Amino acid sequence: MRGTILLKITDLSARVAGKDILKGVNLEVRAGEVHAIMGPNGSGKSTLAQVLAGREDYEITGGSVTYEGRDFLSMPTEERARAGLFLGFQYPVEIPGVNNVYLLKAALNAKRKAAGEPEVDAYEFLTLIRQKMKLMHMSEAFLTRGVNEGFSGGEKKRNEILQMLVLEPKLAILDETDSGLDIDALKVVSAGVNSLRNPDRAIILVTHYQRLLDYVVPDRIHVLSGGRIMKSGDRSLAHELERRGYDWVLETEVA
Amino acid sequence: MSSILHPAAAPQSAALRSFAAQWDSRPADSLSPLREQALQRFLKLGLPTTRDETWRYTNLRSLAARSFVDAPRKARGEIEPNASFALLNKADRAASLLMVNGYPSMPLADGLIDGVEIYSLRDVLRLDPGTMLRFQDPLTDADDRRWTLLNTALFVDGLYLKITSRVSVPLVILHVGTADGDNNIAYPRVIIEVTPGSGATIIEHHVAQGEHTPLNNSNTQIVLRRDAQIEHYRVFATGADATHIDSLTIRQEQDSRCKQFTIVLGGGLLRATLDAHLDKPGASLDSYSLLVGHESRHVDCVNLVTHAAPDTRSNQVARAIASGTSRVIFNSKVIVNAGAVHAESQQSCRGLLLSPTAEIDTRPQLEIHADEVKCAHGATTGRLDPNMLFYMLSRGLDRDTAQSLLVYAFLADALTGMSVASARAAIENALIAQLPDSQTLRNFR
């Protein structure tokens, strides 16, 4: 039985700096599903992720997005997060002077507050973090450092997944989380993502390569190109793309 | 004493006339000849105007029409140091000295402190004029030293602290300003001498009590002898109606080390000058300025650091934030005299604007007259990084909290060097109270 509709994107168009990037995106994601959005560079994948998270520099020029039936586009970024959205950044931001653990605790408490729950107990919180850090193969030094400060590319990506594991989102959008990872780190990150899969949650993987999809197997794959979803299919589509390239999708579309 | 005003002088402002009248009411003392010269110079030069180089951002015109009288002397019992006056807690075993409108309160300290000799300047003037004269810098027309002339002429009393060993407990000088009316003026004067090989941590904390606050023309001199060291704080925490002009002079001898914190958390119009002289080889200065512009506050901070000997080093860190309609100015100038080879200096000033109506002006300057020096400076002013902000919002933090955390992180560089943990905590708390989401931030720490 398929889950309830979590996210519904209808004819979504958006522009940044006067340039149209998304030109009518349609997508439906149900609870329990993992979707992969693939596509060539500049196709609008990251824009879609950022628009869904509520980035203000993007102008929505048409269409709608509902999340659990609510108008998502009218909600500010922080409310979307508290409602269960998590965006894993392609380039996680370094914030010197703001401690990693402070940020995580603030994020978790903001979510709990919105849900009418009490703040997390400091001891329980540290126990939770330590447990998730172990899963992500992260060192204790992480606890005392600034957010992503001086982290390697791989460490930053692992930190994104750690945050996701602590915040337990209903909908996770992971933007190129696989880029810049060596094979061992990719396995760790994939295990983290897989540990979160359950019938109540959905995950959208935004990626350029199918490599990640060998470890986190998606239910649906979409090819985004020129600001629109040109083709959708099951996991076999990824292998076909790998073999024939993105041009193949574009050509079949024209034909 | 006969009138100081020259009959042929140009028309004087009400303020200058009132300073002259204060002089006329002062009894003669061992410093009178120097004081008279200082006042004559001040009256001739007048109040600084925006045409004076270091005063171009701060307009004192509104002072000219006022007739100032001495702020009252108050007994210890008339002052009620409330909780907000406390920078330290009992665990610090700190010694505390009270100065009200520049007059030290008796007894001078709660008890004897090992390694600290404490005198009132009134006693020094009377009993040891030689010592008093030893601390007087040559008079100068320089506009950044203008108010020092007036303080030198008119201070009545003050404190002379002689540090004679490594003192482990922090010493707090609580300066309370309190006025009986609108046009009071105070001339607090503090002299701190750290003898060879000695060291201390001294916190000067400026607060106000009561409805009216005097115009405060305060002056502190620090002299570090060979191998001496000091960690000195000046914390300004008066109310929004306070006008305060503070001058700090530091003279450093061989291998002496100074760590200085200038922290502006209060006041309506505040001018803080630091004039440091690295006079002998091996002298080293770290200066941290944490300048918070809040509501309509005006903060004008001037740092002058003179490398007068070889192998001296200075490091200046300034962090300014401005919200509301406040204005923060930070001017720093490093001068490397001829012959001061291998001098090292660094200046880093960063400004953060939190409102479209606030203003920050920073100007690091370098004047080098020696070869083989290593001098660097940088200044940036901007708004909060939108990428950082978005990242935090995307994690569910509300905007106020995210902004406050970023502001706090921005200022942290100027706080980390503080070795008195409780003072740092108290300063952070006062700072946080002036940030957008203070309650959440408190819960963080």
Image: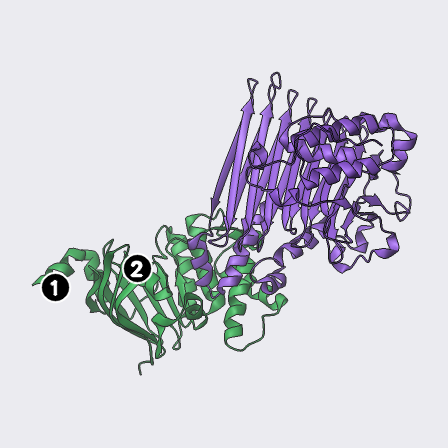
Name the foreground residue: B264 vs B12.
B12
Q: Amino acid at mark 1?
A: Glu
Give residue B295's position: percent from left, percent from top: 57, 56
In the displayed structure image, the side of residue B410 where residue B241 appears, left or right: right
Numbered label tally: 2
Residue A253, label in figure? 1
Chain B's shade in the image?
A: purple
Q: Residue at x 85, y 27 (%)?
A: B131
Q: Amino acid at mark 2?
A: Thr
Task: Label 1: state its secondary structure.
Answer: helix
Q: Chain of mark 1?
A: A
Locate residue B78: give its quadrant.
Answer: bottom right
Tell me which chain appears green.
A
Between marks 2 and 1 in the image, the one whose residue lies nearer the viewer: 2
In the displayed structure image, the side of residue A213 where residue B200 appears, left or right: right
Q: Chain of mark 2?
A: A
Q: Does residue A158 lie above or below B222 as drawn?
A: below
